[in-house]
Image (spheres, rainbow, N blue to C red):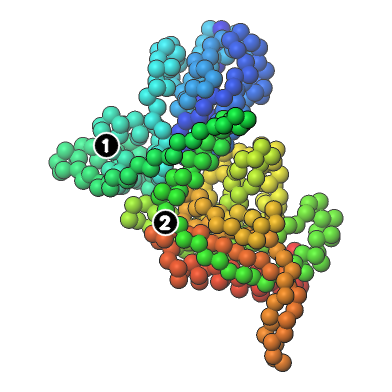
Amino acid sequence: MANFELVMPKLGESIIEATIVRWHKKEGDQVVEDESIADLATDKVDSEIPSPVEGIVTKLFYKEGDVVPVGKIIAIINMGGADAVVPAVSQSNPAPEAKEVKAEAVSAPAAIQHVEPAIESNRFYSPLVRSIAKQENIPFGELENVAGTGKDNRLTKQDLLTYIQNRGTKPSVQPVVAERPKVQAPAVTSSTGDIIIEMDRMRRLIADHMVMSKQVSPHVTSFIEVDVTNMVRWREKIKDNFTKREGQKITYTPLFVEATARALREFPNVNASIDGYKIIQRKAINIGMAAALPDGNLIVPVIKNADQKNLLGIVKDVNDLADRSRKNKLNPDDIAGGTFTITNFGSFDSLTGVPVINQPQVAILGIGTIKKRPWVLETADGDVIAIRHICMLSLSYDHRLVDGALAGQFIKRIQQILEGFDVNMAI
């Protein structure tokens, strides 16, 4: 019998494990090629894993709810034919050799108990490197300071082994970590008639991420009002023809994304992250846009290299990501790699808001609703009051890196770009 080893796939650049939410097949079931065999969940996105082959599921190594490292064998599928084991092949994560399957099947459940949670870092570490570091008792803070020779300074196995060999000749420098006082949440009691609802997995992740962000970053928020009358008039003028030509609508979001991308090019410290006392200025400008899901949760798909795209390209990206967000069809890479985030309070007619920074970024832009208001205009004949379309922007920023002056200059630049919008621009 030819047995196919189905392994946990790599679901994104920084994802090293996933949770098996649901098995669609049980042992003894028939499965056809490309049929979904399981639902997976990571700390970023949910996904399905299709069967690459047709056959009978003869072995499931994990239960629903188990957390499985990338590359581990999760199932065996009997394809019939000759007596052989066919290892699953993945571009980024080859499966373990066939001779290890039997031992893996026995030890897999125990291995789950020792999987370390993902560490918040802007640097990718392969499961092998993490395993070696754990065996050698190398703390994460020390690992972060080991030079890497791989692509994008990635730490390779040989880099770590060389470091370990030389480590014994000099005392390791342990990072000084200040003890953070633990905050005890107040006791909460329920009363008769109260409805108690258990948070789902995504809401728990959002809650933990928001609390972590407020603990990590000293948040400060600045506000500015923007006269977007030219932008509104331009959209009103072209939207019908655009919809007929492109088969999709043009909203205000792509216009804010384009203006933000231009400003980020001029202020690299806003398109950055903090690693200890190091500032990482991001080369790519990848703008995430917070999107509300039908179930009330939140997700942030990312427009990659937004500064390198024209407005039409940004419009299509925004519409595609928004549509797939609503249908729960995003891929892990669609929400990875963001360097700056935009959230639109105006969708719900809110004047403005104070957003929480999406770690490990250092700033987030909030967009308020666009309202007609009486506005003072300076003219050659003196000041006049006119009816204009006004929008309030809010910028929350990490005061460890972004000071009030930098934040003010950045948000002012966005204001200048939007107020200077060309009403005769073609798209």
Above or below 82: residue 253: below
Q: Residue 1 versus residue 307: which sits nearer the camera?
A: 307
Q: Residue at x 60, y 43 (%)?
A: 298
The extreme bottom residue here reads 381
Q: In the visual, does 350 lie left or right of 333?
A: right
**Disc on the earlier residue, 1 or 2:** 1
Name which quarter of the figure residue 186 lies in.
Answer: top left
Percent position of residue 227, x then y: 67, 72
Above or below 415: residue 91: above
Percent position of residue 176, x then y: 25, 47
Q: In the visual, does 410 lie left or right of 55?
A: left
Label 2 element class: loop
Q: Quadrant of the N terminus?
A: top right
Residue 186 makes an appearance in the image: yes
- Mark 1 near mark 2, Cβ–Cβ under 8 Å? no
Label 1 element class: loop
Q: Which mark is residue 138?
A: 1
Q: Residue at x 51, y 13 (%)?
A: 85
Q: Residue at x 67, y 51 (%)?
A: 317
Percent position of residue 288, x then y: 58, 51
Percent position of residue 61, x then y: 49, 15
- Identify which amino acid the numbered label 2 is placed on: Pro
- Identify which amino acid the numbered label 1 is placed on: Ile
